[in-house]
Image: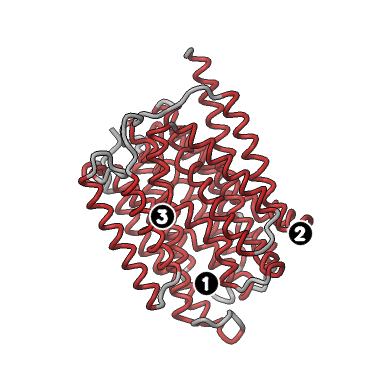
Amino acid sequence: MQVHERHHESTMVLILVMFTSFITPFIGSAINLALPMIGEEFGLNAITMSWVTMAFLLSSAVLLVPVGKLADIYGRKKIFLTGNVILSISSLLAIASPNGAVLILLRVVQGIGSSMMFATGIALITSVFPPHERGRAIGMNVTAVYIGLSAAPVIGGILIDTLGWHSLFYIPALMGIGAVIAAVYFIKGEWAEAQNEKFDLKGSIVFVLSMSIMMYGFSKLPTPVAIVLTVAGLAGLTLFVKMQTKAKYPLLNVTLFRTNRLFALSNLAALINYATTFAITFVLSLYLQYIKGLSPRSAGLLLILQPLVMAVTASWSGRLSDKHDPRILASAGMAVIAIGLAMLIPIGADTTLAYLGAVLSLLGLGFGMFSSPNTNAIMGSVEKRYIGLASGTVATMRLVGQMLSMGIATMVIHVFIGTATINPSNYKQFIHSAGTIFVVFTVLSLFGIWASLARNKKQ
């Protein structure tokens, strides 16, 4: 393939991956705005409504590692396209959901399609871009993710208000179909560096079941049944690790975590980053609506400051990581996040919106500085035959971190106000719970700085 053709193909891969990187966070964030309308239409209670969101997150997270390995064996483009087809069809079907149970089931199927896109997107970018251009490309892809998050409260809110919640699913359906057609027409290459290996089906089953049980249990803490499920899931993952050390063709090369310090600690830093940041929007959304009395639209407009600053910063930091040590850039980003989290600890009824806007902007700067360089460090730390696996691992850290973040937040709120709804009689307790959550997140982010700094320097 000539240099011009290679450049054209790599550009098309980046554009298509950016499109899909926009879709998933957009629909994931926008669907939260539609939950009250969905609940009213189908007569769902609050717990069942939460599963419209959780079903997607769970099915995506537990399949990322197996799907990443499948992509290394059978071809990353093939798995990427299959994921787009599954997401498009399930989105079209979701538009006509007759009840809540069917919608939740289709959200599971959407999660399966998204896991195929999550696991292969960064891997495809890493496959087609040389190391000196990879950080820039990854930074642009991360920017697409944050644009999706930024656009969701505005575009999603307009669509829901004017056309109803069903309209949200037209976007992934139409964009997914377009991505498949463009990929088939413009991208001729295929990347499958592990095509001579066999897929570890037994290990996949143990991994998926254990992850599902653990994540479901953690989402229900601190009830006794949830504790049992969480422990059982962790025990299953321990068994999975032992199985992988003996497997001829392991699903997850666990020796990478033992022998590749850069890979292991970069993934740990990513896990901690998402565990300390994902629930910020959840907590502040409740705070702004209950304590400050803002409407959902007004609260959303303030909260988009964070992803907007992220979108601007991520592309810049990605380019910087091609020239400078990603370890230092990511660690600096985590330090900025720690400062922003510490500034949220004392929030109360009298905290001004200007103060919150400044803190959200600071947090967005930190996230943007951390994400692209850290991802670049992970993808550049493994051999080509492990690129799909590394991409799946990065995405797994993100989704597991998000689940941990929500689990920590809901558990702390439960400790302070129990199962009661948030109302004027417990506003003070809710504010105390918010401060405690941000204390926990600040402490965790300090561990994240350590994990980020403890890596080997860029070679």
Per the image, the residue denoted by label 3 is 273
Residue 448: x percent and y percent?
Answer: 35, 55
SS at mark 1? Answer: loop
Q: Amino acid at mark 1?
A: Ile
Q: Is residue 182 left or right of residue 346?
A: right
**Which tag, 2 or 1, sits closer to the chain's start?**
2
Per the image, the residue denoted by label 1 is 347
Classify 44 as above or below 126. below
Kindly report the distance in space between the C-alpha atoms of the residues bearing marks 3 and 2. 34 Å
Q: Is residue 49 left or right of residue 136?
A: right
Of badges 1 and 3, nearer the viewer stands: 3
Residue 197: x percent and y percent?
Answer: 31, 33
Q: Image point 39% across, 43% down: which residue?
A: 374
Q: Image point 52% across, 46% down: which residue?
A: 114
Q: Which residue ends up furthest to the top in the rendered image?
A: 2
Circles 1 and 3 in contact, beta carbons < 8 Å: no
Q: Which residue ends up furthest to the front in the rendered image?
A: 202
Kindly report the distance in space between the C-alpha atoms of the residues bearing marks 1 and 3. 21 Å
Per the image, the residue denoted by label 2 is 161
**Which tag, 3 or 2, sits closer to the chain's start?**
2
